[in-house]
Amino acid sequence: MKYKILGIDTSCDETSASVIFDTKIQSNVMPSQTEIHAQYGGVMPSAAKLAHIERIDAVVQKALKQAKTRMENIDFIAATYGPGLAIALEVGLKKGIELAKKYNKPLVTINHMEGHLFSSLLQRNSTNTSNTTKLEFPVFGFLVSGGHTEIVYVEEFGKYKIIGETLDDACGECFDKCGRILGLGYPAGPVVSKFAKENRSKFNLLVYKHQQSVLVKATNKQTGVSYTLPIPMANSADLNFSYSGLKTAFKNLYDSIQNISKEEIIHLAVLFEEAALRQLEIKIEKALKQYKVKEILLGGGVVASARFRSKMISIAKRYNVGIRYPFSKKLTGDNAAMIAVAGLFRVNKYNLLHNPAQGIYIKDFETIDRDPSLILS
Ligand code: KG4
Ligand code: ZN
């Protein structure tokens, strides 16, 4: 079925609302909170909550207006219940409940990661074809964001098995922390990527084994100076990730360089990016050797990195599997359109609007107030 859906996401620092029709985006509003959190060098939960409260009504109104529609014409609402910052999530979820009650609309609660997982299926409003029926399972979801680094084996919609995940920090978080060490502000991940992109050609990159470890070396082609970082977990048999060791090694390397120059900051950014992305490559390759899948769906903030995407495209080619990623950078990070599209798949899969007994279609709004996560399990 084709539905018009209002999506709402306030899981972290973006206050976002979106209207989609089928898989097509009609609006996706997300005013940035970056300036608010930059002063803290990271997301400050209480400030995020306040900003969500201040903005949510205007954001929803803007999403409806941009989509040239009204609440009355919405078929159902999809709002994120978690994971995320509890006090931030609450704002969007409560708004979803309030609108559902006021306009007598069904509300579907969505796992934020399920949104990232299906973000690549969103389409421009101008697209002629529909993406709804095109996905053939099983697929891998490769979710790489500021809070998660995981490979999800998706047997079919709603049947997920996390086959590999980070044991400590997430990849995006590590980008941010190491970029911050280099003085690149907040969030530093995109700046590290930009520096690396503009300067990578000035360095020779070499990945090699040394005793039990796998290392990356970046050598400045002009000066011959090299720096090295480890790729944690590269040799482990499982599909898990680890980024805290890379952060510590990076901090030690940074501290060992006296009077660091702009050139050396660039050198370290190039080296770091390679070490961080290599781990992702190694693990997805290992996963492809162990599981047969039709496609890889990329999702999460780090997918904004063109280098990451091109590495994944060549791996997918080599293993003869398809690959999808969001059509716009805006859809890689947190946004409500991805929550709406996950809502669409959930409603279609379980025929929710016609079969409320299936469980996820929420009539009893009071229950959701108590513990939204229980309703989905
Ligand atoms: O998905 P997202 O918006 O938020 C979470 O749910 O975590 O991901 C944000 C993360 C941040 O850590 C940010 O630094 C990282 O994605 N990121 C990048 C790039 N753009 C955003 N990391 C590397 N390269 C980029 N171009
Ligand atoms: Zn996210």
Image (cartoon, helix red, strand yellow):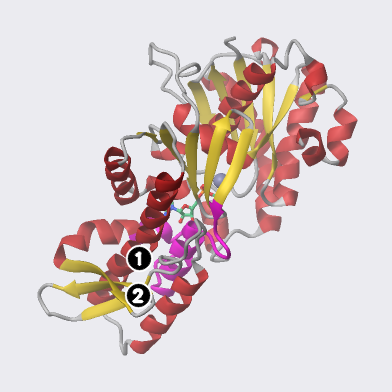
Q: Residue at x 48, y 68 (%)?
A: 177
Q: Which residue is mark 2?
A: 229
Pick the front one: 140 or 9: 140
Q: Which of the 4 image quadrants contains residue 190?
A: bottom left
Quadrant placement of the C terminus = top right
Residue 284 % position (x, y): 41, 50
Membership of 166 in magenta stretch = yes
Q: Residue at x 38, y 32 (%)?
A: 327
Q: Is residue 31 above or below residue 28?
A: below
Q: Residue at x 45, y 19 (%)?
A: 134
Residue type at tag 1:
Ala
Q: Which stretch is magenta? A: 164-192
In the displayed structure, does residue 289 sit left or right of residue 54?
Answer: left
Of pointers 2 and 1, the one earlier in the residue sequence: 2
Q: Which of the 4 image quadrants contains residue 256?
A: bottom left
Q: Which residue is mark 1?
A: 275
Membership of 175 in magenta stretch = yes
For the residue labelled by badge 1, is the local secondary structure a helix, a strand or a loop? helix
